[in-house]
Amino acid sequence: MTTSNRANTSVQSLPAKPDRAAAYWASRVTVSILKLRIFIALFAIVIVFSLATDNFLSTGNMLIMAKHVTIVAILSIGMTLVILTGGIDLSVGSIVGISGMAAGYLLLEGVKIGHHIVFFNPFGVALIACVLGALIGAINGYLITMLNVAPFIATLGMLYVVRGAALLVNNGSTYADLEGNVALGNTGFEFIGNGTILGLSMPVWILIVLAAVTIFVARKTPLGRRIYAIGGNEQAARFSGIRTNRVKLFVYMFSGFCAAIVGLVITAQLQTAHPLTGQTFELNAIAAVVLGGTALAGGRGTVFGSVVGACVISILGDGMVMCGISDFWQMVIKGLVIIFAVVIDQLQQRLQSRMVSLTA
């Protein structure tokens, strides 16, 4: 082989630089579009249902959808931090139920102390219910961190334990008419679910404050960085000096706290506490987190994405109801949407890996 032939063979074996550049920019553009998929999906859902139904964008329907969005969004905020550490919390729906029952019990029956029955004002009732939710979350965290029970098993077990406890509170019955009594000083509980401040309902304000604080913690504080580090590589995080057990205990307590808030909001809106409130809520919360781009393996995702995911899953459900789609088909469609979201997320990760290899 001559020198010129060897040179030609060598040139042909090297990847052409223009082709690598084109592949890189094509991947980059695709990844940029995929990162906006949740906003594109939300926009598309709103457009489709506004064209399919006459009253989809009416004021009354928007208020109803806002209530549904806040419930899923608040749950998804706590669930996001849990999943970022590589865990899962299946007990949040049951915590919603028992926190509402606790509120009903405190408002109607009070707490017997000695020979007296003490009734709490709405603030005290809400505080006790939130502490209860955080305590159940702490039990989940203890089982997972100290007894090494898998998160799925620990929270699945607590799902049944807490739901059973909620049924036991009033022998399976509801607490109705929670307006309170002026003489007892426990009126005004309905403000948590139906009150308004500056034109926005209280649940929306609760969502805004909770989301803002959680986003700040996740992005700007050492605690947030530790949460991401544990989800990325727990063993490496432990070797770097992070007290992983404490961080994981906190995220499960926070998830229980968020679930308790949802229980209070629903109970205040309905003025009734039902022990079965919150059934399957954990599935909607997990769906919102996945749709928002949080990886179930942990270490990657945002609280804001989960809130937008909650908007998608809630508006999708409300839109299908308005279109007269049966409950059975709604389940099928929601399941397909979740699977599609995970597939798209995996595609995004592969394209990002390809971009890295093309720049190497």
Image: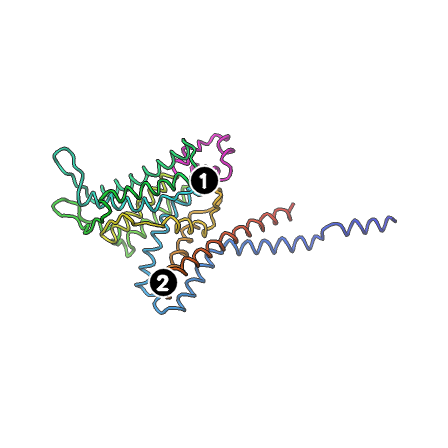
Which of marks 1 and 2 precedes in the sequence? 1
Q: Residue at x 29, y 39 (%)?
A: 132
Q: Position of residue 135 (x, y in %)?
A: 32, 37
How are the colours assigned in the image?
rainbow
Residue identifier under label 2: 321
In the image, is residue 55 above or below residue 192?
below
Q: Residue furthest right?
A: 2
Q: Residue at 32% of width from left, 52% of height from top?
A: 204
What residue type is disc 2 on?
Val
x, y percentage for residue 173? 22, 48
Residue 188: image location, x then y, percent: 19, 49
Nearer mark to the viewer, of 2 and 1: 2
Q: Residues within 10 Å of mark 1 (few under 14, many from 20)?
A: many
Q: Which residues are magenta?
A: 221-250
Residue at x 48%, y 54% (from the top left corner): 339
Is residue 207 placed above or below 144 in the rendered structure?
below
Q: Which mark is residue 85?
A: 1
